Image (cartoon, helix red, strand yellow):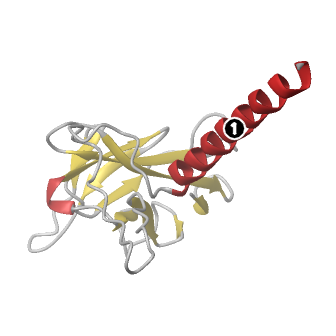
Amino acid sequence: MRDKNIKPSLRKVAYICILITLSLLLITAGCIDSAPKNSPDVPASTCSVDAGVCPVVLPGSVRIEASPQEYSPIMSSTVGIGLTPNVSGLNTTDTQFEWNATYGQFLYWSAPDYTVSRLSQPVVNHGEKIFWSFTEAPASLPVPVIITVTARDVQSQKVLAGSRMTLGWKGNFTVVVEKIE
């Protein structure tokens, strides 16, 4: 009699485990939306049973574009390293960019008058090109210079993406773009 009671109980436990496992697989595959529908950050599910696909929404990204790759203040062709955000997957009309540097200064320089204006940190703009420069080498070489840009939603100030650039020293009065991530 004892064996008869154990078999139905084990069978129920096995069915429950299988149902839980299948549910977890569906949720992690993205075909069942477990988030509340009234949440503003959760897009409506657009899974298609007919097509057998659930689209994947990739987050936006920003990457610092820098030119020239090597700079010295004695160069006559530019006032610094030109910096612009290279954006993908973001609505740039609703995005502002915040620039910071561990050393040096940011400058604005463009047509029609090509007047150089010094900008205070952090620089906040909407993606316009700015320049990074320096007037003297730091006291402790070879400390790298780190430049960051953070993309934020204008309304909510929520961080959307970011990028970081490392400048290394070549001699006492030249910097080189070493890494952009």
Residue 151 in sight here: yes
- Residue 125 picture location, percent across and down: 20, 51
Residue 135 in sight here: no
| Tag 1: amino acid | Cys
Left or right, 34 with reference to 115: right
Task: In this rendered view, identify the residue nearer to me: 78 or 4.
Answer: 4
Q: Quadrant of residue 84?
A: bottom left
- Which quadrant would the N terminus be assigned to in this image? top right
Secondary structure, mark 1, is helix
Q: Crowding near pointer 1: few (<14 within 10 Å), some, many (20+)?
A: few
- Most extreme residue toward the front, as rendered? 1
* Up/down of 51 relative to 83, above or below: below
**Residue under the point 41% across and 41% down:** 34
Task: In this rendered view, identify the residue nearer to me: 9 or 51.
Answer: 9
Left or right, 90 with reference to 155: right
- Residue 50 picture location, percent across and down: 37, 79
Q: Which residue is mark 1?
A: 17
Q: Quadrant of residue 111?
A: bottom left
Left or right, 168 with reference to 105: right
Task: In this rendered view, identify the residue nearer to me: 170 or 153.
Answer: 153
Q: Quadrant of residue 168?
A: bottom right
- Most extreme residue toward the bottom, as rendered? 51
- Residue 69 picture location, percent across and down: 53, 70
**Residue under the point 39% across and 72% down:** 49
